[in-house]
Image (spheres, helix red, strand yellow):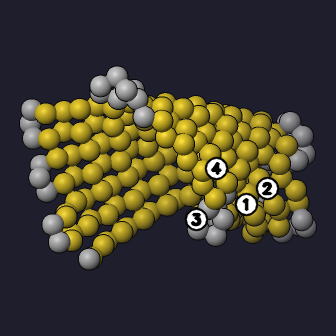
């Protein structure tokens, strides 16, 4: 089985002020493309997502704000079937940051909010089904900030802890409930750029 996976993660770009009363603006952009060709199975999959955050630093170590996320995933099968998932989330976050020295700082984000998804499956030109679901999410993401020069720095994280639910309506009136717990320390990795001013 051959797989080709291309991942473009422009993980976090942020502009933050290390002083009380400042505004934090950050976000992430992700692109993922995959083509699977295997005995009897062949499909193409692509994903694009954007997740911005805006917060207010009300204390030297604490920042609170809002976060959002939008994403689209498309899967094309060889039998003229296409599946498209549209995801949306909106919530709040609370960040605690602690300087370790002049170069390094550690921080953790706690995010809680609402999420929804809409799945549309089209088979040929005349058959289409839609399934919608909504629920909530909660997650903790720790990270390290490295001050490179004059407030410019890099953010590193290696995963986090999360729980989310989705309740689907279902086409026949009987909905499905999905609950997911994820422990991704050491499994996920992202690098970001930030500016403190």
Residue corresponding to mark 4: 162
Mark nearer the viewer, 1 or 4 = 4
For residue 85, which quarter of the picture? top left
Contact (Cβ within 8 Å) of mark 2 with mark 1: yes
Image position, residue 92 (x, y; %)? 68, 34
Quadrant, the N terminus: bottom left
Q: Residues within 10 Å of mark 4 (few under 14, many from 20)?
A: some
Residue corresponding to mark 1: 143
* Mark nearer the N terminus (2 vs 1): 2
Image position, residue 102 (x, y; %)? 89, 67
Mark nearer the viewer, 1 or 3 = 3
Question: What is the distance, in whole Å, between disc 2 and disc 3 at their CAs?
Answer: 17 Å
Image position, residue 26 (x, y; %)? 64, 47
Near-viewer residue (57 or 69) = 69
Residue corresponding to mark 3: 188
Mark nearer the viewer, 2 or 3 = 3
Q: Secondary structure at mark 3?
A: loop
Question: What is the distance, in whole Å, between disc 1 and disc 4 at their CAs?
Answer: 15 Å
Residue furthest front as drawn: 174
* Mark nearer the N terminus (1 vs 3): 1
Q: Which mark is residue 107?
A: 2
């Amino acid at each position: 089985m051959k797989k080709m996976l291309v991942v473009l993660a422009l993980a976090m770009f942020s502009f933050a002020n290390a002083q009380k009363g400042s505004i934090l603006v950050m976000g992430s952009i992700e692109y993922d493309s995959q083509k699977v060709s295997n005995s009897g199975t062949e499909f193409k999959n692509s994903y694009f997502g954007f997740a911005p955050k805006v917060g207010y630093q009300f204390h030297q170590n604490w920042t609170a704000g809002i976060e959002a996320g939008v994403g689209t995933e498309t899967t094309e099968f060889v039998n003229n079937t296409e599946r498209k998932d549209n995801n949306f989330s909106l919530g709040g976050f609370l960040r605690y940051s602690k300087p370790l020295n002049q170069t390094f700082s550690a921080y953790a984000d706690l995010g809680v909010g609402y999420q929804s998804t809409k799945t549309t499956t089209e088979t040929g030109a005349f058959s289409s089904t839609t399934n919608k679901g909504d629920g909530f999410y909660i997650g903790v993401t720790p990270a390290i900030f490295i001050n490179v020069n004059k407030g410019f720095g890099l953010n590193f994280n290696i995963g986090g802890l999360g729980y989310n639910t989705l309740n689907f309506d279902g086409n026949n009136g009987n909905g499905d409930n999905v609950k997911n717990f994820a422990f991704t320390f050491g499994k996920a990795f992202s690098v970001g750029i930030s500016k403190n001013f």
